[in-house]
Every structure is written in C-alpha cells, then in structure tokens.
Image (cartoon, rainbow, N blue to C red):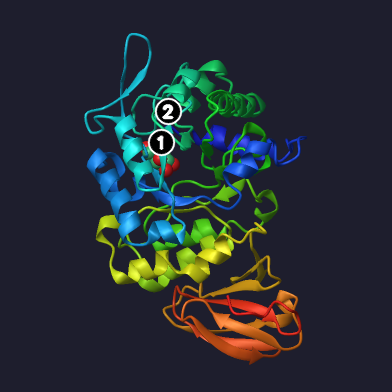
Amino acid sequence: MRFHSPSILTACASLAITLICHVCPAANAQSAELAPTPPMGWNSWNHFAEKVTDADVRAAADAMVASGMRDAGYIFVNVDDSWEGERDSQGNIHSNRKFPDMKALGEYVHSKGLKFGIYSSPGPKTCGGYEGSYGHEQQDASTYATWGVDFLKYDLCSYMDIMKLHDPAQDPHQALQMMQAAYRKMHEALLNTHRPIVYSLCQYGVGSVWQWGPQVGGNIWRTTDDIRDHYSSMALIGFSQAGLEKFAGPGHWNDPDMLEVGNGGMTAEEYRTHMSLWAILAAPLIAGNDLSKMDDTTKSILMNKEVIAVDQDKLGIQGSRIAPPQIWMKPLSDGSKAVALFNYVTDDEAEPLTLNFKDVGFSGPLRVRDLWTHKELGILHDSYTVTVPQGGVVMLRIWPQTSETGAAP
Ligand code: GLA
C-alpha cells in the first residue's frame, strides 16, 4: 500500500466512532446473494505482486482444479494490481502487455468452473501507480462486465490525494464522506451493469469501514493494513479482529487480508494458526501463494475441509475471543462450536493450554473432535488441557452430547 497519509487515516478513524451508520447492515438484497458465506478463492498479489502475467493466472486456475482447491470451495481467481494499461481516445481502459486479452482470460477462468476477479482504484492511480478508475467509474464497470468479471477489489490508494486536493485542511468528516461517496459510486456503476459482481473494499480499515461498508455496497472490506508473510504481521492482524464480530454476517464480511499460507515465511504450525484464525473469524479465504507449486503441507492446510467448514458455516457468525490469552470460539449452525486454542505466548516453548467448557457455554458430556489431527477425542467433561506448539494452534469442534446434533461431520 502506498499513498497513505497517516494524519488523515488517524483523523478518519477517530471520527468514524461518532458516525455510526443509520441504515441497517445488509444494505441491499444483492449483497447477501453475492456472498452468503465468506468468499473463497485466490489472488495474485501476495506471491506474484506486480510480476503477475496472464500465464500465471491461467496456471493458478489450472492448479485450483487439479489440486482439489476448487472442489474444496475456492472459486474466485482474482488478478490484483498491475494488469492495467492505457486508456484509448474514448477513455476505455485496456490491459497492458502482460495481459493480452482480458475477455479471453475471463473465459478461460470460467471454462474451469471458476469465477474471475479484477482490481482497480477510485483514484487516478492504483497503489502500484497503474491507471485507476477516477472519472471513469461507469465505463470501467461496463468494461469489466464485458470481460466477465465476477469480483472487484477497489483499493483507495491515490484517492487519498484527491481527498487532500479537495480539502487541504483535511477535515476528517469531509474526508470520510468523500471516501464513502467514491465507494458508493463504483457500487452503483457495478449495479448498472446488471452483472453480479462481488464488491471488495480495500482502504485498510480507515474510518471504521466495518460500520459503513455495507451501506456503500461492500461485500467484504479490509480491516487492516497489508499482511506480510511473517508470523508477527499475521498474528497482529488476526488477533486484532477481536471486537469486530458484530459487523460481519451473510453478505458482508470483515476482511483481515489475504492468506499467506504456502509463501514460505512462516512455519507449518504458524500457517495452521493463520488458517484456523481466519476460519474462526469467518474471514474471506483468498489464497495468496503459487498454486502451481504447492507442497503437501500447504495443501493439507489450505484444503482442510473441517476447518473450511467452520469458516463457511451458514450461520455466518464471526467468532470471538472467549478466554485469555487467545482462546477463540465460533458458534456453528448445527449447535456445535468451533474453538481454537492459540499458543500466542512469545517465548520459545510449547504451552499447555486449558479450555474450560463453561467458557464456551457448554456443560455436561461433550463430544470433542480435533480438526487438525482429524481425530475424535472422546466424550469429555469440564475441561480439556493440551500442549500447543509455539506459534501453533489446536482447533476443536464441540458438540453437546445431549443434543440431537452430535453426528460426525
Ligand atoms: C495495496 C493493497 C494490496 C495490494 C496492493 C497492490 O497495498 O492493500 O492488497 O492490492 O495495493 O498495489
């Protein structure tokens, strides 16, 4: 991310506390249909960044099918920044030399039973300095529709400069209104295409976007600055989501950024933490690795169906922290609860962590299953103590034994 002015960001963030939206969270009916559960897919940025080419995206689509990721639920193939070329004399956007034919690319992605995503900015330039949609919103939305686009990530970037130009005094109230208007404008342009396009707001959580994201048409909105392929970045972002749970639900989700699983900067235990935490958070699961070169560990993490089922549960409740230091719980639609015990303590040791079942709201006999070892732990009472590796996680699914919902998943 570039172009960010800390003073505006901070001012917007504090102001937004007083600007709670007056409209109900699910602003339009289309939202719930577009993203009834958190979107799943792949995006080019975290691994390829500005080097991504048409061939890389096709290879990602191929690998999504061949690896089983598509069948595990990963559907979107999203091209991030750096596809953009010049506008022609009519103002129509064209892709650059790395992407010779976007319509053909969209068709290729669709031919694999996948959906096609793209990236732009409300500003004149994207974060990478490529052509943005400023002043061409409807034209770009219509172009995307002809290319078969199903998902748009819309990244604030140089729109910050427009906000500053418009109001050099940087009044936070005005800044917030301008930002909301810019996001609403593209939403309306997308609606005018009559093509269902998932709308992903990317403005790094500025101005408490979770409080107004649905009102400007967002299906997902980034809640933080960019993730990096490092445990400290991932953990800081993931664990800082505590408290945002009330803003997520079917059609509109908090987005703590894309996955780094498989990119090499974390241990397998840490990547299991990443995947578990994002699932507990009901976060979009957008893989960000090179899918054509996945080892078995990466596959086992990204395609753990029991963990994905937690993320994709139709109740759509974002989980929350229930006990210190980092024990998190997400209620599920069959009456069970997913619980993750994270060893987030910063010494170098595996830690015994104890889950008291009363903290989950359960008493009596409970059926407990470990979602990473895929083993039943038996019928347990009162509490469960387990040694969790450094930076790692134990993730459980717990069914009250007396209910009728104790069937194996
Ligand atoms: C910003 C976004 C990233 C990525 C880059 C592309 O930094 O937050 O996710 O899209 O721009 O330039």
Q: Is residue 29 visible?
A: yes
Image quadrant occupied by the N terminus: top left
Calculate the distance from the C-alpha at mark 1 to the C-alpha at mark 2: 8 Å
Query: Residue 103, image x and y in percent?
Result: 33, 30
Query: Which residue is painted at 40% across and 56% down in the image?
Result: 70
> Which residue has dot 2 on it?
144
Q: Nearer the viewer, residue 231 or 329?
A: 329
Mark 2 Cα within 10 Å, few/some/many (few <14, many 20+)?
many
Query: Residue 199, image x and y in percent?
Result: 53, 37
Image quadrant occupied by the C terminus: bottom right
> Which residue has dot 1 on it?
118
Q: Amino acid at mark 2?
A: Tyr
- State whether residue 302 is above or below residue 153: below
Q: Amino acid at mark 1?
A: Ile
Of marks 1 and 2, which one's residue comes earlier in the chain? 1
Q: Are marks 1 and 2 in contact (CB under 8 Å)?
A: yes
- State whether residue 362 is above or below residue 306: below
Query: Which residue is painted at 55% across and 86% down in the image?
Result: 376
Q: Quadrant of residue 217?
A: top right
How many numbered dots are placed on residues in this image? 2
Q: Is residue 324 visible?
A: no
